[in-house]
Image: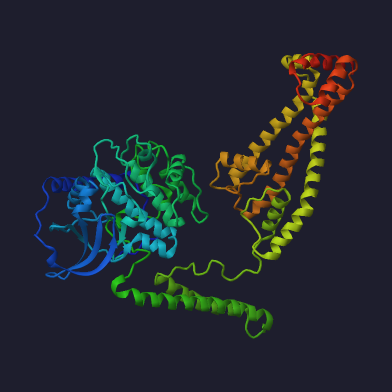
């Protein structure tokens, strides 16, 4: 296959391009409908016409084998399905539907059926052999994919789903295990076990839990929008290395899916986050791919700005990654990868040592610029060779090794969480001496911190009282309450402090929403609230170190405001108790005896207490 070199500037995708592609899809749909109505007659085959080479994998209903045609010497994948198992699970109708669709589709990125036959025990489906294997195996090996490679695969998935939906086919099982790579580096969507031709809506509950759409869980009926949801999950998993919604408990995972809230990894670019968020919209009517413009919204998105859709469709774009023939060249390729890895690591260390030695033994004969130029030139050649051979460049996450694990800001943030007894758990000491110092530090520092917070609370409470006295007159309804109960006027101070605290929480939520890319206002408010109450669950913490110091200052001020409310309430109780002690007469003696007794107090006996306190307060 001949690949075209990718141009420096890609022509922006327009409505004219989409209209031209739609006319192409109309022709493909007519061909599909003709094949579906009149399946093509193929050369009859039996299992004896193939030689079994190897076992490729095991599925839910059968085994997939690598076979070779004895007459043409071509390799194929043979899916052997046990009849008894298919009948037991009542999947006969679905198997016939899958066979009919596979032999009718014809698209570059969709698996098609080459032949099919059966014997007394098995049903055999013959499909092209895709030497690159599953995308799942690549993700498992590399951990995650780069964004350019993810864009390349996602673009092909968009075209494949657009073709299937144009033919009224919904796949309902988009996941890395069902996406295969061919020898040229392009992908093919396979496993049509859950596919279905729909005219309007369908209600069948099926799919893989991690990729299932909310409308399937709710059994409200759904259309092609479920495949666009799965595409959003796929893009997220390719870049992050894990799905956005996951739990070992399936029901909890479904709750997360219905909530639709997820955190984007830091390695994901803003444009990719925007596309994933638009594809993972819980409302299928607002989801990309289901809007008025259809798939055009996805193709036109900024994340695909470097994709030439026409070149990808005709497989003329040079793939970022070309898999090897695993059956024949895998051992040699792995040895080559190890050689390139060791060579790249060695050259990196040589570069570091050269700079380090120059700092100690530098001479005027060789300048620093020339030394760096020579060493970097060698390193760039090795790096270019390794990258061109498909080597993952994330060789060591902690290279070179760091002498200090924590930055100064992280240490300050950790110290503040210890002193305020919050303990988020995102930063913890790992050594014995670090933990021992943490215990001693907490025993000494926590009482001092509580003292400072209490003192700040008294200062803030005094400020609130002084400010309240200089405020304009209260509304009439507040004046009536004050006249009926002067003690209630003092209670308003505490309510004002509570109101100010909520304003402070809202301001903090707005700041954290601005600082953290994937936080909503609710996430910020939730974090601020659990911080003010010193709970600190640890499920939400700031990720950016440069904001941790501001977070520490915010915590101290917020705890002081919380202490202010407590101080205002304490002053109100103290004032009420002083008024009660100032009472004299038989009623006061009776109240003191009731207080000393502490049990069997009839609340109705205190009915006149409010009137007495009112009289005493008015005299004062």
**In the picture, residue 375 is in which quadrant?**
bottom right
Quarter holding the N terminus?
bottom left
Nearer to the camera, 82 or 98:
82
Q: Which residue is found at the position 32% from the left and 37% from the top? A: 222
* 259 shown above or below 242: above
User: Tell me, what colour scheme is on the image?
Assistant: rainbow
Q: Position of residue 290 (x, y in %)?
A: 35, 39
Q: Position of residue 153 (x, y in %)?
A: 36, 57
Q: Is residue 304 visible?
A: no
Q: Position of residue 550 (x, y in %)?
A: 69, 48
Quarter holding the C terminus?
top right
Nearer to the camera, 539 or 388:
539
Nearer to the camera, 72 or 362:
72
Q: Which residue is found at the position 12% from the left and 66% from the top? A: 48
* 243 shown above or below 285: below
Q: Is residue 277 left or right of residue 581?
A: left
Q: Is residue 14 left or right of residue 363?
A: left
Q: Is residue 546 left or right of residue 35?
A: right
Nearer to the camera, 330 or 575:
575
Q: Is residue 519 visible?
A: yes
**In the picture, residue 502 is in which quadrant?**
top right
How many marks the image carries: the answer is 0
């Amino acid at each position: 296959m001949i690949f075209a070199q990718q141009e420096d500037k890609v022509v922006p995708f327009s409505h004219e391009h989409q209209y031209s592609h739609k006319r192409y899809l109309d022709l493909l749909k007519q061909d599909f409908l003709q094949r579906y109505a009149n399946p093509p007659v193929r050369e009859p085959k039996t299992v004896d016409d193939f030689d079994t080479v190897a076992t490729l994998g095991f599925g839910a209903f059968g085994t997939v084998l690598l076979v070779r045609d004895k007459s043409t010497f071509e390799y194929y994948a043979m899916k052997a399905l046990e009849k008894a198992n298919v009948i037991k699970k009542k999947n006969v109708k679905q198997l016939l539907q899958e066979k009919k669709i596979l032999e009718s589709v014809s698209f570059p990125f969709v698996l098609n059926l080459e032949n099919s036959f059966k014997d007394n025990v098995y049903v055999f489906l013959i499909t092209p052999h895709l030497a690159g294997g599953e995308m799942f195996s690549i993700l498992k090996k590399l951990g995650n994919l780069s964004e350019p490679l993810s864009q390349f695969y996602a673009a092909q998935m968009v075209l494949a789903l657009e073709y299937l939906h144009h033919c009224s086919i919904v796949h309902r099982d988009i996941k890395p295990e069902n996406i295969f790579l061919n020898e040229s580096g392009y992908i093919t969507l396979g496993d049509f076990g859950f596919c279905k031709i729909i005219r309007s809506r369908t209600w069948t509950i099926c799919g893989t839990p991690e990729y299932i759409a909310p409308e399937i869980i709710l059994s409200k009926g759904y259309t092609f929008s479920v495949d666009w949801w799965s595409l959003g999950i796929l893009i997220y998993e390719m870049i992050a290395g894990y799905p956005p919604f996951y739990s070992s408990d399936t029901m909890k995972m479904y709750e997360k899916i219905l909530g639709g809230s997820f955190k984007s990894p830091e390695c994901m670019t803003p444009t990719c986050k925007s596309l994933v968020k638009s594809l993972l919209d819980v409302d299928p009517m607002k989801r990309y791919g289901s809007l008025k413009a259809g798939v055009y919204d996805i193709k036109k998105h900024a994340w695909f700005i470097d994709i030439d859709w026409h070149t990808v469709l005709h497989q003329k774009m040079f793939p970022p990654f070309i898999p090897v023939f695993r059956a024949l060249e895998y051992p040699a390729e792995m040895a080559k990868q190890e050689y390139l890895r060791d060579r790249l690591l060695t050259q990196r260390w040589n570069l570091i040592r050269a700079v380090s030695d120059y700092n100690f033994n530098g001479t005027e004969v060789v300048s620093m610029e020339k030394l760096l130029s020579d060493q970097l030139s060698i390193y760039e050649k090795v790096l270019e060779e390794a990258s061109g051979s498909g080597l993952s460049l994330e060789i060591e996450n902690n290279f070179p090794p760091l002498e200090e694990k924590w930055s100064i800001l992280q240490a300050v943030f950790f110290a503040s969480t210890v002193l305020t007894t919050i303990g988020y758990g995102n930063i913890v000491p790992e050594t014995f001496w670090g933990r021992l110092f943490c215990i001693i530090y907490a025993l000494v520092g926590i009482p001092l911190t509580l003292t400072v917070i209490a003192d700040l609370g008294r200062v803030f409470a005094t400020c609130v009282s002084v400010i309240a006295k200089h405020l304009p007159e209260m509304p009439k309804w507040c004046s009536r309450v004050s006249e009926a109960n002067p003690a209630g006027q003092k209670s308003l101070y505490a309510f004002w402090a509570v109101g100010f605290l909520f304003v402070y929480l809202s301001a903090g939520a707005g700041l954290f929403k601005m600082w953290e890319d994937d936080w909503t206002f609710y996430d910020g408010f939730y974090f601020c609230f659990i911080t003010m109450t010193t709970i600190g669950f640890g499920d939400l913490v700031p990720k950016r170190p440069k904001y941790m110091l501001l977070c520490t200052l915010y915590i101290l001020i917020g705890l002081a405001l919380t202490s202010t409310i407590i101080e205002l309430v304490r002053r109100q109780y103290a004032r009420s108790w002083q008024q009660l002690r100032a009472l004299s007469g038989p009623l006061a003696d009776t109240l003191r005896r009731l207080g000393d007794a502490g049990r069997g107090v009839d609340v109705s006996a205190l009915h006149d207490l409010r009137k007495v306190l009112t009289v005493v307060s008015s005299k004062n």
